[in-house]
Amino acid sequence: MNGSKVQAFVGARKGLFWWIRKGAPVPPGLLVEQVLNYGNDEDVRALFALMGEERVARIFSRQTARARHNYSPVMKNFCV
């Protein structure tokens, strides 16, 4: 995953990533969590184009397998 593409993705969605400083690295897990929890369908499509559906699914599965996570109950149950 290209860092400049991630920065462009985050920069285009300032409402989802308002607390991230410009140019700060954004971990893949945070990208997936924020977009799936708070993004719209266009944001999700763009995330799939950036990271690939399989990688997003792996990250989501790993995060939701833990006892504690930050996904809303609706998102966790919708995607399972």
Image (tube, helix red, strand yellow):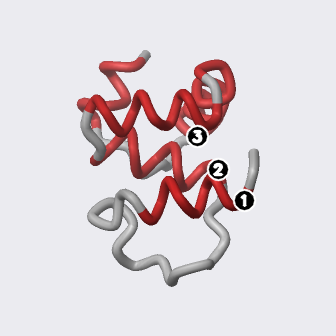
> Residue 70: where, in percent of width, then height?
41, 51
The residue lying at 33 percent from left, 22 percent from top is 77
Tell me if residue 19 comes above or below residue 66 in the rendering.
Answer: below
Disc ID at residue 63: 3
Which of the two labelled residues, at mark 3 and mark 1, occupies the earlier sequence position? 1
Tell me if residue 13 comes above or below residue 46 in the rendering.
Answer: below
Depth check, mark 3 against mark 1: the one in front is 1
The kind of residue on which mark 3 rests is Gln
Disc ID at residue 28: 2
The residue lying at 67 percent from left, 70 percent from top is 25
Residue 54 sits in which quadrant? top right
- Real-space CA distance between mark 3 and mark 2, rounded to the nearest whole angstrom: 11 Å
> Residue 21: where, in percent of width, then height?
50, 83
Tell me if residue 38 comes above or below residue 11 in the rendering.
Answer: above
Q: Are marks 3 and 2 in contact (CB under 8 Å)?
A: no
Task: Answer few, some or many: residues within 10 Å of disc 3's Cα (few below 14, many 20 plus, some between 14 and 19).
Answer: some
- Real-space CA distance between mark 3 and mark 1, rounded to the nearest whole angstrom: 22 Å
Which of the two labelled residues, at mark 3 and mark 2, occupies the earlier sequence position? 2
Quarter of the image with the C terminus in it:
top left
Q: Nearer the viewer, residue 25 or 60?
A: 25
The kind of residue on which mark 1 rests is Gly
* Residue matched to label 1: 3
The kind of residue on which mark 2 rests is Pro
> Residue 8: where, in percent of width, then height?
53, 59
Residue 1 sits in which quadrant? top right
Task: Answer few, some or many: residues within 10 Å of disc 1's Cα (few below 14, many 20 plus, some between 14 and 19).
Answer: few
